Amino acid sequence: MTDLIIPAGGGRKLVTPAQEVTFKATQAQGSSISIFEVVVPPGFDVGAHVHSHSQEFFYVLEGELDLLCFEPTERTTDTWHHWKSAEGDRVIRAAEGGCMFVPPGTPHAFRNATDKPVKMLFQSYPSPDHEDYFEEIAEIWSRGTTVDPEAVEEMRKRYDVSQITPLRYEPPVPAIPGQDMNAKRSG
């Protein structure tokens, strides 16, 4: 079988605590667009960011993602979840079949605010920018249990990613039998 036909579940996988990325089409195969299948765990928020020359496309295969793709009236640096555009655009919750195209220069973000993993198809142009990005972020994650924010920031600059709000990964805390879910969390 050639590497141009990939069976269901096939492709090279990179797995980190925050994402599972399966490479589907790459520059090595002759593609000018990188195509990935990504599993986004509950609690993952990529943070709002912008690319000066890259284009991206996201398609929800399973589950629901919060999506943002517009210039807000105000770019706050803490969170993008409540941003609004001058035209009234707001963050949307996209279900299976929902998609987002991101032209260069457009702030965008996604997050899994549900309690189930989400599977999406992700395309990025030009290839191999995001292929290399995923390789390097996996390397950073593999160095230990915490991620060095300065290393991530330096890496993002090299791959045309200008971060506006922080990347966050806050997995839901599993319920403990008998625990009062209305009790305040300490910490």
Image (cartoon, rainbow, N blue to C red):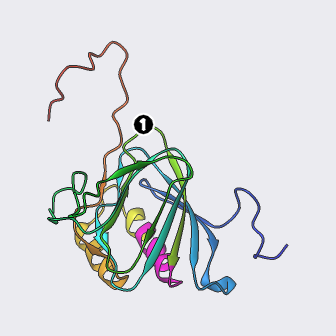
Taking the spot 52% from the left edge, 83% from the top edge, the residue there is 128
Residue 82 image offset from top left, x and y in percent: 21, 51
Q: Quadrant of residue 142?
A: bottom left
In the rendering, at what x and y percent does residue 48 appear? Answer: 28, 64
Q: Which residues are magenta?
A: 125-138
Q: Is residue 94 left or right of residue 5?
A: left
x 36%, y 51%: residue: 92
Quadrant of the frame with the C terminus: top left
Residue at image coords 35%, 82%: 160
**Where is residue 93 shown, x and y percent of the image?**
40, 47
Residue matched to label 1: 115
Closer-to-camera residue (71/78): 71
Residue at (33% x, 84% y) in the render = 52
SS at circle 1: loop
Q: Is residue 161 above or below residue 169?
A: below
Does residue 69 appear to the left or right of 29 in the view shown?
Answer: left
